Image (cartoon, rainbow, N blue to C red):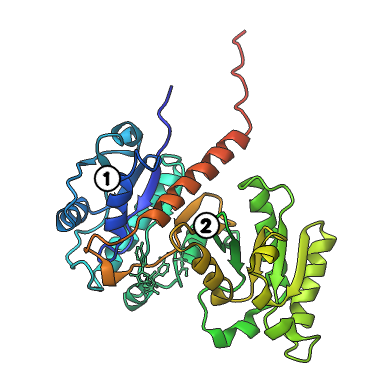
Amino acid sequence: MAALSPLVLALGDPAGIGPDIALAAFQRRHAASVPPFIVAGDPAALAARARLIGLDLPLVETSPETASARFTDALPVLPAGPAFTGRAGLPDASSAACVEASLATALGLVTAGRAAALVTNPLAKSVMYDAGFPFPGHTEWLAHRAATPGRPAPHPVMMIWSDKLAVVPATIHVPYAEVPGLLTIDLLVETGRIVARDMARRFGIARPRLAFCGLNPHAGEDGTLGGEDEAIVRPAVEALKREGILATGPLPADTMFHPEARARYDVAVGMYHDQVLIPAKTLAFHDGVNVTLGLPFIRTSPDHGTAFDIAGTGRANPSSLIAALKLARRLADAERAAAPAPAPALARA
Ligand SMILES: NC(=O)C1=CN([C@@H]2O[C@H](COP(=O)(O)OP(=O)(O)OC[C@H]3O[C@@H](n4cnc5c(N)ncnc54)[C@H](O)[C@@H]3O)[C@@H](O)[C@H]2O)C=CC1
Ligand SMILES: NCC(=O)COP(=O)(O)O
């Protein structure tokens, strides 16, 4: 039987904690049942970080085809990109080329069917922007790369998922002042459709319950504390309901995250990044996973950032990465199980 395709892990910013958590996740592979993965990145950077944090772990340069078999005894690495010349904990413009090359290599493996799903370690957005990276983050870069010629790029939807809470920000990496102008009925309806579809087909929740946050305090208090909730959020929720999607809202966001409220929905859709990422990261910082919905492949990531303050100290907790690897494996296996079986070969006459 052919070996299971591994997951591919893009190393992320090599000056951040990406190398630390990749190594630590591999170190815990048996104890934490971590699924096999291959790292796309600079093998020398990984080896140097292992020495720095005092981890004596074997690395092996190999291909995805042999990675799953090698994973028991060595961390598989696929060399990608230029050598990292910076230092742990010091954001450095030269990291951007390493990040981009690692991402491109990792994505190439997934789209070629050589890896089962993409997991990305964090990049530092300011480092990438300074180097001219023209996308707000992975989410938008992946949607751009997933576009097929002549067709619009897929609409990517960020979800931060844990078994305590799943949230989706309808607007993502944009200045807060721009949020009201970006919120439209179409944006919310499209976001709701993608969430409902991917929760059903990838997470196995046939009819997910979506709870939409209001934008304003008290969801606008019947229009007296801001007009967007009645003019945009409510019509979007009504439109989704007409399509058979279990949507509610606009709900006052401040009372949506206590335990009884969370029991009433599967996904909270927020109007802006911090409205829903704050409760998600507060409840589950170390086991939260960032999942991109709406793409033709599976992508997960730890929910935290590059943590330059602790890179190379050995203090980085790999739990969120481990959760991201496990969720990617679960989603990839579900997709494989749902795929139609290949037609039986026709017997020759
Ligand atoms: N998926 C991605 O690529 C993401 C990238 N970022 C980027 O990360 C950079 C730093 O962002 P911050 O807001 O400082 O958030 P951060 O998550 O990197 O750090 C926030 C605090 O949490 C701690 N922390 C983070 N991860 C940890 C871990 N695994 N174990 C132990 N402690 C941990 C850090 O030491 C720091 O004190 C920014 O440039 C941002 O753009 C942030 C979030 C996600
Ligand atoms: N705050 C979440 C985050 O920054 C992750 O963004 P992305 O790089 O996954 O698009």
Which residue occupies 21% across, 66% down?
88
Could you tell me the amino acid type at mark 2? Val
**Quadrant where the image shows the C terminus:** top right
Q: Nearer the viewer, residue 190 or 326?
A: 326
Please, what secondary structure does the residue beneath circle 2 have? strand
Looking at the image, residue 207 sits to the left or right of residue 78; the answer is right
Q: Nearer the viewer, residue 85 or 53?
A: 53
Measured Cα–Cα span from mark 2 to mark 1: 23 Å
Where is residue 248? Give x, y as percent: 77, 67
The residue carrying pointer 2 sits among few (fewer than 14), some (14 to 19) or many (20 or more) residues within 10 Å by Cα, namely many
Where is residue 52? Give x, y as percent: 15, 58
Q: Residue furthest top?
A: 349
Q: Is residue 62 above or below residue 277?
A: above
Q: Which residue is mark 1?
A: 77
Comes first in the chain, label 2 or label 1: 1
Can you tell which mark lies on residue 291? 2
Where is residue 96? Give x, y as percent: 30, 68
Looking at the image, residue 231 sits to the left or right of residue 18; the answer is right
Classify residue 183 by image quadrant.
Answer: bottom right
Could you tell me the amino acid type at mark 1? Val
Please, what secondary structure does the residue beneath circle 1 have? strand
Q: How many marks?
A: 2
Which residue occupies 85% across, 62% down?
242
Where is residue 207? Give x, y as percent: 74, 51
Which of the four quarters of the rendered structure image does ligand 1 lie in? bottom left
Q: Is residue 210 above or below residue 327?
A: below
Classify residue 215 by image quadrant.
Answer: bottom right
Q: Is residue 32 above or below residue 349?
A: below
Looking at the image, residue 124 sits to the left or right of residue 250; the answer is left
**Quadrant where the image shows the N terminus:** top left
